[in-house]
Amino acid sequence: MALESGTRVGIYEVTAKIGEGGMGEVYQARDTTLDRNVALKVLPEAFTADPERLVRFQREAKVLASLNHPNIGGIYGLESSDDTQALVLELVEGPTLADRIAEGPIRVDEALTIANQIAEALEAAHEQGIVHRDLKPANVKVKADGTVKVLDFGLAKAVDSDASGGSATTSATISLTGSATQMGMVIGTAAYMAPEQAKGQAVDHRADLWAFGVVLLEMLTGQQVFRGPTVSESLARVLERSPDLDALPSDLPPMVRRLLRRCLTKDRRGRLQHAGDARVDLTEAVTNPGADAIVVPEVPQPGRHRVWQMSALIVVAATTAYVAGRWTGDLESSSNEFRRFALPLELEQRNFRTGSSRGFGISPAGDVVVFAGDPVRGDPLYRRDLDSVDTVPIPGTERGEAPFFSPDGRWVGFYVTTEATLKRVSLSGGEPESVASSASNLLGASWGPDDMVVFATGSTPGLMRVPASGGVPEPITTMANGQGRHGYPHHLPVGNRLLFTIDDVTGDLPMIAAVSVDGGDPVELGIRGREPRYLSVGSAGYLVYGQVDGLVAVSFDPETLVVGGVPVSVLAPVQIGNTAVHATFTTDGAAVFLEPTTEEQFRPMWVVRDGSSSLVRGIEPSSYRGVSLSVDGRFVALTELEVPLRIQNLDTDELFAVDSRGAIYSRWAPDGTAVAFSSNRSGRFLQMYTVDISGSGGAVPLAETDKPRAVGSWSRDGATLFFYEVDPETGRDIYAYDLDDGGVTPLLVTAADERSPMVSPDGRFLAYLSDASGRFEVYVSSLPGLDVTRQVSRDGGTEPNWSAAGDELFYRSDAGAMVAVPFRSAPELSIGRPQELFRDEFLREEFGNTSYAVTPDGRFMMLSAGEASARSVQLQVALGFADELQRLVSEQQKR
């Protein structure tokens, strides 16, 4: 009901209508008692007709009236007259900020002064637990003297309070129920809603900080950030789009760019946490525009957490100027000093794997690092902005591995082994999307400027490409006769070409090659190494790749593919995995890498069927990678890297020194007198040997060949050793070796990948892995002719092993569990339903053998991380690496 001039509402006399408010009409009125002008916001009849709701509103209005700050439009009270209910507000003269923005961008100095006053208002309100919930330019007025007034503080909460009075975290959404919907009201304006507010989730003070960022960005650019033609389109833009910072003024202080980025982080856990921090930054930006302030938040917790946060703040201080320089394009002044430091992470986030995939990636702009936790444990990917102390999980990326960025830095690709799927997720939020299915572990991926993803896996015939939006992969390369796997593609900036690696079947380092993204004949570059990457520094180009002992770089022309000069060691030390290099770069040389994890240690554990565990007595932690038990369970052989086997009597703790250097896999002879193992000791990767544990003789080679061979299991009669061999044409295949006459019998030689041969105690069946179905599953076949074959696992499986009696077959599921399957061979073959025994958080063998053992009494011996495991492992950050690389190469050329 409209009020005419002269109408009285209590002691207030209406003088003119001055606008429409978010909850009703707004009038100018005269306070006849105090003789001052006020604003009356008249509540709609549909609202005042609900007595219970009106009582709640009155309660909230009293709280809001307690706000007393020069930058907050005051609430004087609530006035009633007949059927009219009105809020009595401070009358603020002057244009709204929306009016000012409509005229175009506001000068930087003026915009920062206005923003500073808005931040002061937010800080004062948040300290009293009051959240605005509807901050927008239309709710900000600028008086003639420059004073800023933020209006309508907390009214959205007052309207939407629940029966209990609510709290500062009560949800505020577009869709209201009951009387609010009937009033056609919106709690919050769509284009200024924080993503969590737009989703209808709980809202707290961080929603105001998002809206503050949007308002500041609009002041500086004169452009509306998320507004669409409809409410739903505005909400969609909030949820899906990232704000464009390219339109910001060139003279904007770098710290303000950083502030905007932190305010406009879609995940509120990674967003700016306090309005006071914004005020400090803005004050510094006005008084000292060339500085880049670092706000040190209060850290009340003592002990390790405080130390971690202080370390993180040091990293932020070291990186902020560099990152700000990248945003402004000022690389000359920001990146010329080489600096290297650890990126502090909480202990539970440091469980990096060092197998076939790198566990982290850096954005092309060099400002965001995404890394994987422990996929076996179910960890998600984590995001860490280099100018922030906060690390936040990326929703929907559980069990994700091998992250890599899109060229624009807005998307992250990753691989989920348990789903055998390549996926992507937007950094601005949203559900992950499938890109392509794959049957085996990822061997690198690269996202090209044509929005195609090139990748390789252990089961693909070569490099594959697929649209980033998803589709059916098509081959780029095919393995030729005598070649190993193709992998680790990397887009070159010119020539529409890729770098990649071709595995050497003899075990030598891979050959580095280049090929067109459209296919064709690869060009070998004449150098060997792992995971090549191209970096440019000014007019110079460099090829960086992994060697056995670290990273090296050589001069490289991406157009002619000519490699020149002597390799120079860079960024030492860097972790080099079995196939991957655990370092990544921006094209102009910011680097993130993992130091060698030589201190990573594991200890043997006894584990029973319910998952409870205890330490194996008498064995200290070390870099163990595999476990083998004698048939009677009295002796253990523990495999370590690059050292002889640790062979120990579990009853007496007696150790046996045997000639077993370089052992990788080991299996006990049935009588417990000897151990078979694979080793690269001869210079040919993974040849088989046996050694007597008495130490009376040296290791005896078994059927030496030019193909890698890994021992699998020993038949109970001691006559046959089952193993798998790596063939360049057929992949891994299973054979049997006769220890009496030295004959080799092929058992499974197919186009599929077969590995982990484990013979049953009675010698009648062979359990093994095969990816014939498109993913690795556990199978059982009858011996000797493999006439009967059954699939045992259903949703992926690895590491098969038998119970001592042969009545159960165990394996480890892709979902991260130890699984038992009942097995009966007589009177007829019967395989029961897989039963999950316990969630499996122990060390896993990544390359096709078995890293645990089963005792005669049904316990498991497994490898669990020791106290020293990975605790000091941290990601390392190198800024200015491009210039350091150029210096190192120049020095080498002068020698």
Image (cartoon, grey):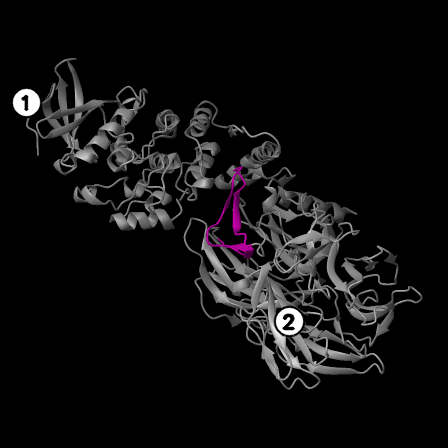
- Mark 1 Cα shell of 10 Å, populated few (<14), some (14-19), many (≥20): few
Lateral position of residue 2 relative to residue 337, left or right:
left
Q: Nearer the viewer, residue 671 or 595?
A: 671
Is residue 71 visible in the rendered image? The answer is yes
Query: As shown in the figure, which amino acid type bears the numbered disc 1?
Result: Gly
Where is 498 relative to 312, above or below?
A: below
Q: Where residue 808 is drawn, which disc sits there? A: 2
Distance between mark 1 and mark 2 Cα atoms: 92 Å
Residue 385 image offset from top left, x and y in percent: 52, 42
Q: Residue at x 79, y 70 (%)?
A: 687
Residue 859: name its quadrant.
bottom right
Residue 597 image offset from top left, x and y in percent: 70, 49
Query: Which span is picked out in magenta?
Result: 378-407
Q: Earlier in the sequence, mark 1 or mark 2?
A: 1
Residue 432 image offset from top left, x and y in percent: 44, 57
Lateral position of residue 590 relative to residue 727, left or right:
left
Q: Residue at x 41, y 52 (%)?
A: 430
Q: Residue at x 61, y 38 (%)?
A: 336
Please state which of the two labelled residues, at mark 1 or mark 2, is closer to the viewer.
2
Q: Secondary structure at mark 1?
A: loop
Q: Where residue 6 is drawn, which disc sits there? A: 1
Residue 67: name its quadrant.
top left
Q: Is residue 268 within the magenta segment?
A: no
